[in-house]
Image: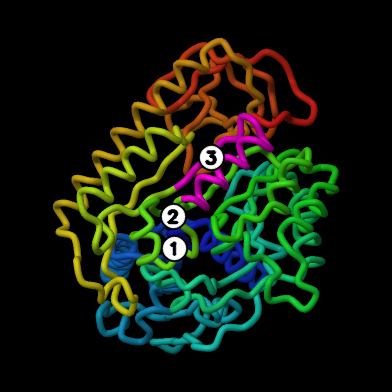
Amino acid sequence: MSVVSLGCPKALVDTEKMLALLAQAGCLVAAPADDADVVLINTCAFIAPAREESLAAIRRAVALKRRGKVRRVVVAGCLPQRLGPALLADRPGVDALVGVFDRPAIVAAVTARESPFVRVSRRPRGCEDDRGRFRLTPRHTAYLRLAEGCSAGCSFCTVPAIRGPLRSKPIHRVLEEAAELAADGAVELNLIAQDTTAYGADLPARPGLAELLRRLDEIEPVRWIRLMYAHPAGMSEEIVAAMADCRRVVKYLDLPLQHVSDGMLRAMRRGYDRRRVEALLAMLRRRMPGIALRTTFIVGFPGEGAAEFRELLAFVAGQAFDAVGVFTYWPEEGTAAGRMAGQVPARTRRRRRDRLMRAQQEIAFAANARRVGSQLEVLVDGLDGEGRCVGRHAGQGPDVDSLCILTAAAPAGEIVKAKVVGWDGYDLIVERIADCGLPIAN
């Protein structure tokens, strides 16, 4: 069996669990695409470019099937959930569809003789148990999902329609999974959900993220705990205090702001305004000096004019974030934003994205130049495709941020002390000094 996993880390966790179920059923899950009986594609359908990437992967698999290289094509995840059986008519040659609420049906989808096989439920269950995964990340790092779905109601977002409302894992199950991952060699746990700050709001005892962080901080083998996908409206003083107090929680935060203009934030239904954002950023930097802040913005949202974009540009220049991702707005069917007046032309959206990214590039390069001569603690990830030994300091998240390039090889999974001796674009060049104990903030 060959596997293609697309989309976000939440989808990757689904892929890892499906692979575990298939391996337990006796399937060999590591074959190349042109030498496999079955191709499994776990898809993303969040926005149009993600859907096109998923459809392109399906086209490649179906082409292999037509050439006699593959016997069965199974499509799972968000695209079947969003399009349903219509996907079969749109993509002849697909043998099975499995939606996001039907993960346990993957074995039947792969082994069934019937075609098409369709399991796309419309009613979500609780957050699935992710223990016992066949992990695709390096052994020393893992994603730990806290919850599934989202109830925030942003006007541009398709996630609630695809993955349903918020469903948090019971806190004891999160802790059990964290202990399992640590026992399997993970020294870095990256906490994920559609909205990590909403964790526990739907559970009977309402345990919050702050309580969970403090409990996770007690797991001795873990060295780094990283908080991803934090909604600004949900970042309470209690969560910030827990981040500051917990020695294993790295001083890094992925905080998608999406915009800063009050008019845009209201139209996006984000639940906060610019004053709240600036107060939150100030509190984070006051409580955790040197904290690495990653954020994302959407440009070209309906109603965004030149003034709103200039406000966003000035805000980014003034805040000097450590990392910024910029997305052009896509009018998604079924969303409130897709029906709004004032849709911005695609060319303008692309131009604004490029301009904002150039502005952030100058900030990032200047920050790298200032780091030369400083010391960092680096988690070694191993060799990359070019044969370089790479890793990340605590202010660099996996898969989304820049890297540290080590001048000499070191074993993957070690945390080493290193000196910054140069930089190459967004990446730092570092020279190992010595092994480390528990990591400092950044």
Label 2: which residue?
A: 32
Label pair 1/3, CB-CB below 8 angstroms? no
Label 3: which residue?
A: 293
Nearest the eye: 96 or 332: 332
- Between the residue at mark 1 and the residue at mark 3, the CA separation in whole angstroms equals 42 Å
First to last magenta residue range: 275-295
Q: Amino acid at mark 1?
A: Ala
- Between the residue at mark 2 and the residue at mark 3, the CA separation in whole angstroms equals 38 Å
Q: Quadrant of residue 302?
A: bottom left
Tag nearer the camera, 2 or 3: 3
Q: Which residue is located at x 50 percent, y 30 percent?
A: 403
Q: Amino acid at mark 3?
A: Leu
Q: Determine the secondary structure under disc 2.
A: loop
Query: What colouring style does the render use?
Result: rainbow
Residue 410 at x, y = what percent? 64, 23
| Magenta run includes residue 283 | yes
In the rendered image of this protein, does residue 312 appear above or below residue 363? below
Estimate how packed mark 1 is, as few (under 14), some (14 to 19) or many (20 or more) residues with alpha carbons within 10 Å. many
In the visual, does 15 lie left or right of 25? left
- Between the residue at mark 1 and the residue at mark 2, the CA separation in whole angstroms equals 6 Å
In the visual, does 217 lie left or right of 224? right
